[in-house]
Amino acid sequence: MSGQEFRPYVPAEQKVAEFTLKSVFLGSFFGIVFGMATVYLALKAGLTVSASIPIAVIAISLGRKVFRTTVLENNIIQTAGSAGESIAAGVVFTLPGFLFLSGESSGPSYFNYWTILTLAILGGLLGTLMMIPLRKTLIVKEHDSLPYPEGTACGSVLIAGEKGGDFARMAYYGLGIATVYALLQKVFHVIADAPVYATSIKNRFFPAAQVSAEITPEYLGVGYIIGPRIAGVLVAGGVLAWLVLIPLLASLIPPDIIAAQLVKLGNLSSLATAGGPGNWDPATHTFSDYAAAIYRAYIRQIGAGAVAAGGFITLIKTIPTIITSFRESLGAVGGNAAEAETRRTDRDLSLKVVGLGSLALILLMAFLPIVPGDSIGGKLLLGVLVVLFGAFFVTVSSRIVGIIGSSNNPISGMTIATIMGTCLVFIGIGWTGSAYEPMALVVGGMICIAAANAGATSQDLKTGYIVGATPKYQQLALFIGAVVSSIVIGLTVQLLDTPTAAMLEKDPGMKHAIGTYYSAPQATLMATLIKGILSFNLDWNFVIIGAFLAVVMELCGIKALSFAVGAYLPLSTTLPIFAGGVVKGIADWRNGKTKGASGATEADEELSRGNLMATGLVAGGALFGVLAAFLATHAGISRYMDSNLTRMSQVFGGWYDLAGVIFFVLMAFFLLGAGLNWHNKTKV
């Protein structure tokens, strides 16, 4: 760190309105909104996008024109609001795993609102609690060495907004376009949901190959935000799965063997029962959709092994950072307690809050009946494991996001390591078998939520340090945001898990939409690992193949985790994301060609018109997806939407899918125009 003391935008001696009722209320509201959107996006695609920048942009526009907020109030708004996105990601990446545990474990019975709510709140509070003693070391003392890219960018947004400029217009344009598009697609069905091209199993040259795309605004926006490199790696995994492995396996494996594998996995009742993935017909011993059957029978397990290995590889590569972070942060706790905190910008919550809060968390887990476990002693062990793993991985998460950003935080790897460590502890004390599966998932889920929230909390504290916020008020705002957003996150998960009338018509026996309509890739992986380790019965052959697939990608210089997630997800998910990445690549190429090397900073990139419109597309598409799922729970509305689908299919005939692609390309053209600043000379 340089010898010159850092001066924040609002000096420590200056008193400015900050922790006010309107800032907390608005922050909680945005936490609810972006938490709901994140639940939908994470369930569908296994991906999330940072909420801090879009919330800051909206806070600036609303604050200036309606609520007359200060820069520090806007910071509290984005701080409280960002908690919703990070907690939603942690919840969705792990807790739906209850549905995929062994039937004898009673895992599905724990997938209820009150359990989700409790674990979300406790995990979110743990992530913020453990960051209190780390702030002065990681945020203040290492200000020059740990950039915290999203936090720095968000601070620049808030300061620039205070100085003037219309930032939110393109985000609102994106929101409007996404809403109209989603209305036409999900309610009136003018736009096809997922155009598909598939070859027959009888095709001699390329059997059971399938190319499809869920042409939604949120996927296009996500692709633009993550850029062409990551989007390309994601779709490459999907291409390998759907255009290489599935046609190969279709050529080699008889349908009866595929069906037997589905029975083994619990995806099909028996060989004599019709239905299941791919729609098995026991009379003819065939599938109507071989690609879907092979995907569920083999590809998902291979993908799970690849994701697990990719997460571990990412974690191993950060071990030097982990060791340094943990050692320095432990040494900083005593120093923090000894310092006199006189300046406003140095006031954290007391370390007593951390100690008492951790103790309260352990006791709550021990005595709450909705936490899995058949004895107080066993549940006390869960609480101790949560606090110990939490202290370690919160430190790890904070330092890692300080270097590479929240979007690259290896949360999956940390959760996998936690689950494996927990399972090994269980095995060591004789806790084996399906009865202990929910307990292991509780530990992994809470650490995933805590680590995700710690990463977001670190970015928020960095933003606060830059603008001159009071840390204590930010920490309180994060506590409030965690509790309020968790209330709605649990409701949203339960809503999306409820099968609609259209889903039940296709599969009358469906009990949960998660796992069928919503992939929930990370949660499925966590459940697979827990079942396999505790029962000593993991389907290792496919998992190991996937693991070495990840190793091969890493040896080729490709980020194994991104490729593995792409191999696990349907190609219909990664292909439209890739389209958004292509649009971003074209925009970057054209802007670089016309403007030359501008040396744009992270903040400049986040403030670009294209990124702001993409943010609006993601928010609008995801929120309307939640709304459409809610509307579809009403039988009359569901029938109306289904009748629209039938009517539009008849109107367009064989051109229905092509017409949908044209609409999608038109939306991509608008996004490209925003990225190239067409038809609008207003400076952002």
Image (spheres, helix red, strand yellow):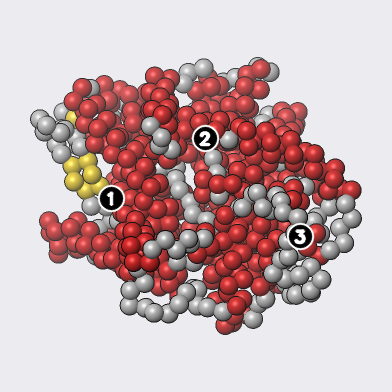
User: Looking at the image, is mark 2 or mark 3 nearer the viewer?
Assistant: 3
Q: Type of residue at label 3?
A: Glu
Helix, strand or loop at label 2? It is helix
Residue density around tag 1, few if under 14, some if 14–19, many if 20 or more, within 10 Å: many
Residue at the image point whose x is 69% and y is 69% from the top: 9
Which numbered tag is attached to residue 213?
1
The residue indicated by pointer 3 is 5
Question: Where residue 211 sits in the image (x, y, percent)?
Answer: 23, 44
Q: Is mark 1 on a helix, strand or loop?
A: loop
Badge 2 amino acid: Thr
Along the viewing direction, whichever of 71 and 127 lies nearer the viewer: 71
- Asked if the residue under mark 1 is in contact with the one under mark 3, i.e. CB atoms within 8 Å, the reply is no
Q: Residue 44: x, y in percent?
A: 41, 48
Residue shown at 44% from the left, 45% from the top? 46
Mark closer to the observer (1, 2) = 2
Q: Mark 2 points at which residue?
A: 314
